[in-house]
Image (tube, rainbow, N blue to C red):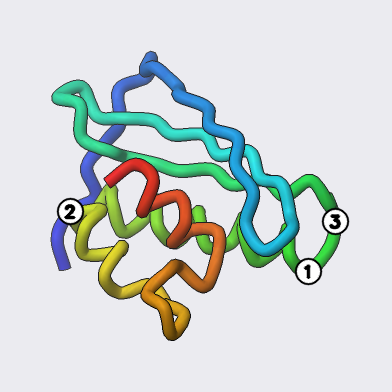
Amino acid sequence: MSQRERLPNRRGHEVLNFEHNGFRYVAGMGRFADGRLAEVFLDCSKGGTAVDVSARDSAVVASIALQHGVAPQTLQHAILRNADGTAAGPLGELLDMIA
């Protein structure tokens, strides 16, 4: 297993608002000093619901993977897809928007 890459103590934070399957999401993204994606945060407008918990949990797992050297494109291709190729979940939607 690769070592976890430490994030800078001070880093920019980008915010995106988007909708997926009828739910509104706010996504936050932090980057390593060299500009690579380092962390993602996902919040659903329906706070405290199973949809919100799943979105937040998926962002935590994605962030850990990114900090261990997994490329965003690798995550993007591993995410579940609908029959038409669109992302099945909000993390996939976010990765499609930023990758």
Q: Secondary structure at mark 1?
A: helix
Q: Residue at x 84, y 62 (%)?
A: 49
The N terminus is located in which quarter? bottom left
User: Looking at the picture, which amino acid does disc 2 mark?
Assistant: Gly
Q: Secondary structure at mark 3?
A: loop
- Mark 1: few/some/many CA within 10 Å (<14, 14-19, 20+): few
In space, the residues marked 3 and 1 are separated at their CA atoms by 7 Å
Residue 77 image offset from top left, x and y in percent = 26, 70
- Mark 3: few/some/many CA within 10 Å (<14, 14-19, 20+): few
Residue under pointer 2: 69
Q: Nearer the viewer, residue 79 or 48?
A: 79
User: Looking at the picture, which amino acid does disc 3 mark?
Assistant: Gly
Residue 94 image offset from top left, x and y in percent = 45, 50
Compared across the picture, whether 71 is left or right of 55 comes to left
Residue under pointer 1: 50
In space, the residues marked 1 and 2 are separated at their CA atoms by 29 Å
User: Looking at the picture, which amino acid does disc 1 mark?
Assistant: Ala
Residue 5 image offset from top left, x and y in percent = 22, 42
Q: Residue at x 34, y 41 (%)?
A: 98
Of circles 1 and 2, the one toward us is: 1
Q: Residue at x 66, y 45 (%)?
A: 25
- Mark 2: few/some/many CA within 10 Å (<14, 14-19, 20+): some
Residue under pointer 3: 48
